[in-house]
Image (cartoon, grey):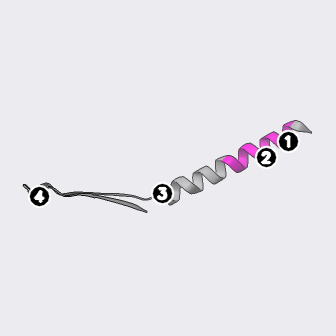
């Protein structure tokens, strides 16, 4: 999980906090690369 916090010293009510959860993206990436590798091995035989 990545957290980014931006603080505005002049206007504290405008503080912004962004949280990005990268776990689902990592699962997608691993699955995508796995499927691509399997397709390549099937094609080469």
State the residue at coordinates (71%, 50%).
34
Q: Which span of residues is magenta-colored?
A: 33-43
Q: Quadrant of residue 2 in the image?
A: bottom left
Residue drawn at x 19%, y 58% as measured from the top left = 7
Q: CA distance from mark 2 to mark 3?
A: 24 Å
Q: Give the mark, 1 or 4, whose residue is nearer the N terminus.
A: 4
Whichever of labels 2 and 3 marks the residue nearer the N terminus, that label is 3
CB atoms at circles 1 and 4 under 8 Å apart? no
Q: Residues within 10 Å of mark 2 (few under 14, many from 20)?
A: few
Q: Is residue 1 magenta?
A: no
Name which quarter of the figure residue 37 lies in.
Answer: top right
Mark 2 lies on residue: 38
Check contact, mark 1 vs mark 2: CB within 8 A. yes
Q: Nearer the viewer, mark 1 or mark 4?
A: 4
Which comes sooner in the sequence, label 3 or label 1?
3
| SS state under label 2 | helix
Residue located beneath label 4 in the image: 9
Residue drawn at x 8%, y 55% as measured from the top left: 11
In the structure shown, which secondary structural element does the residue marked by tag 4 occupy? Answer: loop
Q: Which of pointers 4 and 3 lies earlier in the amino acid sequence?
A: 4
Disc number for residue 22:
3
Quadrant of res 44 = top right
Q: Say few, some or many: other residues with alpha carbon within 10 Å of mark 1 (under 14 / 14 to 19 / 20 or more).
A: few
In the foreground, 9 or 40:
9
Q: CA distance from mark 1 to mark 4?
A: 58 Å
């Amino acid at each position: 999980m990545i957290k980014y916090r931006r603080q505005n010293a002049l206007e504290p009510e405008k503080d912004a906090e962004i949280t990005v959860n990268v776990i689902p993206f990592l699962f997608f990436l691993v699955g995508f690369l796995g499927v691509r590798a399997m397709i390549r091995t099937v094609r080469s035989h």
